[in-house]
Image (spheres, helix red, strand yellow):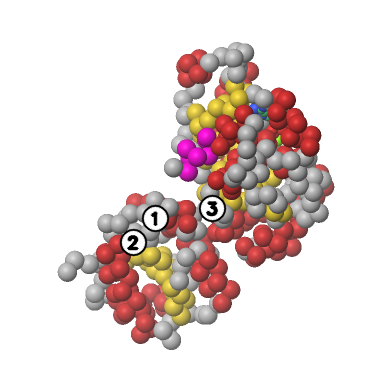
Amino acid sequence: MKRINEIYVIGNNEDLLSSIQSQLSQEYKLQMLEIDEIKKFSVQIVLMLRTDEMSPLDTAQTVLSLYPKAHLIYISDIPNFELLRDLNRMGIMEYLVLPDEDWLLGDRIREIAELKLANHEQSSTVEGFKRGGGKVFTFYSGKGGAGKSLLSTAFAQTLKVESTAKVLFIDLNLQYGSAETFLGIDSNRTIIDLYPVIQELNEHHIRNVAEKEPHSGLDILVSPRDAELAERIDEEFILRLIRASKRSYDFIIIDVPTWIDERVYTTLEESEKIYYVMSYDTIAIRVLKSVEELFQQLGIVMNEKMELIINYSGKDNELNQKDLERFIGYPIAARVRRDLKGVQSFVNQGVPLRKEQKDKKLPPVARDVQKWVRSMLK
Ligand SMILES: Nc1ncnc2c1ncn2[C@@H]1O[C@H](COP(=O)(O)OP(=O)(O)OP(=O)(O)O)[C@@H](O)[C@H]1O
Ligand SMILES: [Mg+2]
């Protein structure tokens, strides 16, 4: 019978390594890997060894986002129940403590290798976002008032309503806020409440601080709306927040301000997609060109992850799609119509554009966002 022979090992821990070598090297080819080079291989079974330098949650996150079907086993020399629970949440059920469980290792690997092989041909499309591979989509524009906040909130809300995915909205307009206006949220708890626990941030903390939009159940991390508090949030805070969110949610939608600082930079770096919001006019194109220059200087690689959202679309637009395509190469993910009256009445009443799946008669903006979200989920 054909079988899987290659097993990849991540994490420098000499003792654990020699221990697994003595168990497995007769039957399998053990290949040591640095996490940065994992893209170059096609991995199916990965052993993560405990080290002081590396969080297994981050490692697992990276592996699963590239290989959603990979089978991960965490091997440690110390038991850690909290970590076990966090790994379980990501769908990693295998946690072995050596040397006590030495004897289990060989059997488990054999089972997995056979199982993997049996499932090899069966592909599943949803698995990718089911297992800890949270996707971060950030809404950005170099131009104020482009519609980032309106569209990011409507997008998050629609995604929550139209799927079973776990969705988190993070409002990084730390000084002024945005979500409370567009989602009609009144909150005392804000992102800053995560400050004391940021070093060990987990799903539980995030859920405790997040507000739930009552109609859809969307989780929202609200902005502190306070310049002084905002100052305390630095790029390391942002990095930890995003990494922890990825472990617990399927989609993380982030609204950022126009002004680029280290925090916005970090957010863009961590994003799987940047939805750049703009309208069909020459000023918007000029601003996008300056943004490109700035990104280039900062070393933000965005070619593969930028998609355009055309907002305020309508008959009286200065330019059209052909004009735009002459100047700009990014794909257009969605077009959203201008609907001043419709949007205003929702915002004034303090209710979200989209509430539940059975909403009757959606206003044009909500309908356009629905079309976009549905095409993305396909
Ligand atoms: N398609 C649209 N139709 C009608 N009104 C819209 C549309 N898009 C945005 N608006 C309105 O335009 C205003 C600016 O939108 P929004 O606050 O989302 O922009 P922004 O890019 O987040 O701005 P800022 O740079 O200030 O954060 C809001 O009042 C919003 O309701
Ligand atoms: Mg905004």
Pick the front one: 302 or 310:
310
Image point (70%, 52%), residue name: 214
Residue 194 left/right relative to 96: right
Residue denoted by label 2:
44
Of labels 1 and 3, earlier in sequence is 1
> Do we see residue 297 in this rendering?
no
Q: Amino acid at mark 1?
A: Tyr
Number of numbered discs visible in the structure rendering: 3
Residue 174 left/right relative to 115: right
Image point (60%, 40%), residue name: 155
Image quadrant holding the N terminus, namely: bottom left
x and y percentages locating residue 154 in the rendered image: 64, 39
Q: CA distance from mark 2 to mark 1?
A: 8 Å
Residue denoted by label 3:
165
Residue 67, label in figure? 1
Magenta segment: 371-377
x and y percentages locating residue 7 in the rendered image: 32, 66
Image point (63%, 34%), residue name: 361
Q: CA distance from mark 2 to mark 3?
A: 25 Å
Residue 353 left/right relative to 273: right
Q: CA distance from mark 1 to mark 3?
A: 19 Å
Of labels 2 and 1, earlier in sequence is 2
Q: Amino acid at mark 3?
A: Ala
Asked which quadrant contains residue 314, the reply is top right
Q: Is ligand 2 within 8 Å of the beta carbon of the residue shown at mark 1?
A: no
x and y percentages locating residue 183 in the rendered image: 72, 43
Image point (55%, 46%), residue name: 162
Q: Are marks 2 and 1 in contact (CB under 8 Å)?
A: yes
The secondary structure type at the circle numbered 2 is: loop
